Amino acid sequence: AEPLLDLALKMIFFGVVGARLFHVFFYEPTFFIAHPAEIIAIWHGGLSSFGGLVGAMLAFVIAIKRKKIQTQFLTIYGNIIAYSALFGWMVGRIGCLMIHDHLGKESECFLAFDSPQGKRLDLAFLEILGLVPLAIAFFVLKKKKKEDLFAPLLFVYYGLLRFILDFWRAEASFATGDVRYLGLTPAQYFAMVLVVFGVFLYTKRPSPKKVS
C-alpha cells in the first residue's frame, strides 16, 4: 500500500505541473510569452486535463524506470489507477459543470444551457453523460474479474469520446473556447495518441493463465 500511495502523490504533483504546462504551450502561448510571470499563477486558472494526464503518466513511467514498481505489480497498479481515474475524472467534470467552465457552441438542443451569450452546449455535461457507459462497463468488468481491461479501455474510449465532443467546443474568440490547429483542438490531437496507446496496452496485456 505504501508504494502505491507514494506513486499516487507523485502522479498528483506531476499531473498539476503537466496540466499547467500543457495549457501554457498549447492553449495560450502568445499570452504567456508576453507575461512569463503568469506561468506559475495557477490560481488565475488555466489547467489542461490532458496535460494532467500526460504528467501523471510521466510519473508512472519514471517509477517504472527507477524500478520502484515491481514487474508483477505493474499491471495491477496501472488498472487500479485507471479505475480510480475514471471516477475522479467524472467528479472533476461535475465541478466544471457547476461553474460552466467549458461552454461550447451555440445550440437549440435540449441539452444546451442558458448563458448570457445564448443557449450553449456544456462540454463538461456532455462528457459526464458520455462517461456513464464506461463506468457501467468498469463495474461489469470488475464483476467478471477482467480488471486488466481497465487501462486499455479507458484510453481508447475516452480518446474517442473527447475527439468527438471537441467538435462542439466554442470558437477560440469565445471566453471558454479553445484554439484550433488545422481545424482541431490540441486535445483532439492528443486524443488520437491516447487511442493508439490504449490499443498498444491491449496488445501487451499478460496472457490469461490456462487452467490445466
Image (cartoon, rainbow, N blue to C red):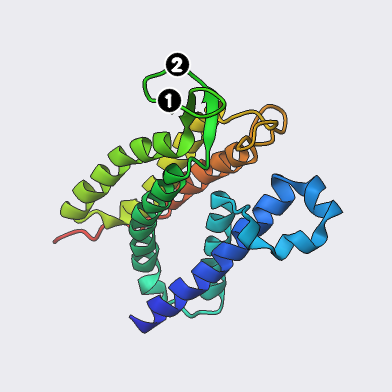
The kind of residue on which mark 2 rests is Glu
Residue at screen point 53% across, 63% down = 56
Q: Where does residue 190 sit, x and y in percent of width and height?
A: 59, 43
Rendered location of residue 107, percent (x, y): 49, 19
As drawn, is 75 to the left or to the right of 169? left
Residue at (37% x, 20% y) in the render: 110
Nearest the eye: 139 or 87: 87
- Could one spot residue 57 in this view of the protein? yes
SS under mark 2: loop
Q: Is residue 61 left or right of residue 182?
A: left
Q: Residue at x 62, y 35 (%)?
A: 177
What numbered label is drawn on residue 112?
1
Element on which disc 1 rests: loop
The x, y position of residue 94, in whole percent, is 39, 47
Give left or right: position of 73 versus 177. left
> In the rendering, at what x and y percent does residue 49 appear?
54, 51
Q: Residue furthest bottom?
A: 2
Mark identifier at residue 64: none
The amino acid type, in three-letter code, at marker 1 is Ala
Mark 2–mark 1 Cα distance, whole angstroms, equals 7 Å
> Is the Cβ of the residue at disc 2 closer than 8 Å to that at disc 1?
yes
Identify the residue at image location x=35%, y=41%: 131
Q: With respect to residue 114, does 49 lie above or below? A: below
User: Which residue, given by chain and number where applicable, does mark 2 sit on?
Assistant: 108
